[in-house]
Amino acid sequence: MRARLVAGIKRLLLLVAGAFLVYELWFFGWVLWWGRVDPGMTRFMEMRAAEIRAVDPARALKKNWVAYSAVSVHLKRALIASEDGKFLYHQGFDWQGIRHAAEVNARRGRVVAGGSTITQQLAKNLFLSPEKTPLRKIQEALITLMIESTWEKRRIFEVYINVIEWGDGVFGAEAAARHYFGVSANRLSPAQAAYLAAMVPRPRYYERHRDAQDLRRKSVVVLARMPLARIP
């Protein structure tokens, strides 16, 4: 009886391990594919599109993929300065930034700061929901490792620039540049780029509050940091 129970537990564990492996291989297959082929829709875009259609069935997302070379160097520097100053040097995780965010959140008693790198943000946007659960964070970490081990930094940054949210149904640098300033992404000025980068943590809120004081203050800080930002 005991032997059969042990054998049954072993089979169950093997089945769970096999299912987990297949699940992760599905993610890894998409990571390899998107390393060469530009994503059309991400998981986060699909979720936002469903929300928008529920209110207005005729409305579509604003998005227009552009090559890395077609994005202003000012916006590239602004995003690095604002979101991940160590992007070129880490392997997907900024442990110092994570530790600092944890200390800030502990002092405030709530989540007010995040330590996510550009690669972690991209992993979440491509595949996952925005909910903050331990399982989701573990999966985000695994996908981050997959991306960092198979993509060049330039490719990571190119995809990131094209898929992040910049407003209600506004995705990617080209759509954002046209939505807020009426210019293409390669024509953004340093100040415009800093403003867009400062919006990234709360894009839908800042779209509704474009003159918010904290947005203006952060734009000034980002603008000052941009000359030191290293980009792929």
Image (cartoon, grey):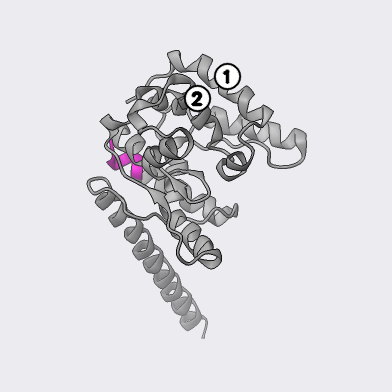
- Frontmost residue, 90 versus 172: 172
Could you say where residue 215 lies in the image, as x and y percent from the top left?
62, 29
Could you say where residue 179 lies in the image, as x and y percent from the top left?
45, 40
Main SS, magenta residues: helix
Upstream in sequence: badge 2 or badge 1: 2
Give amino acid for label 2. Ala
* 188 versus 55 height, above or below: above
Which residue is outermost to the bottom?
1
Q: Quadrant of residue 159?
A: top left
* 171 versus 11 height, above or below: above
Number of other residues with Cα within 10 Å of mark 1, as a class: few under 14, some 14 to 19, many 20 or more:
some
Task: Tell me, for residue 29, which label it has, or none.
Answer: none
Q: Is residue 150 magenta?
A: yes
Pointer 2 and pointer 1: residues touching (CB < 8 Å)? yes
Q: Which residues are magenta?
A: 147-152
**Quadrant of the image containing the C terminus:** top left
Who's the residue at 35% across and 39% down the image?
148
Which residue is outermost to the left?
36
Q: Left of 190 or right of it: where is 112?
A: right
- Frontmost residue, 184 versus 162: 184
Which residue is outermost to the front?
182
Q: Which residue is mark 2?
A: 194
Q: Secondary structure at mark 2?
A: helix
- Frontmost residue, 23 versus 108: 108
Give amino acid for label 1. Val
- Frontmost residue, 69 versus 86: 69
Counting every numbered tag in the picture gives 2
Who's the residue at 76% across and 33% down the image?
107
Mark 2 vs mark 1, CA separation in Å: 7 Å
Could you say where residue 87 lies in the image, as x and y percent from the top left?
42, 28
Q: Secondary structure at mark 1?
A: helix
Q: Which residue is mark 1?
A: 220
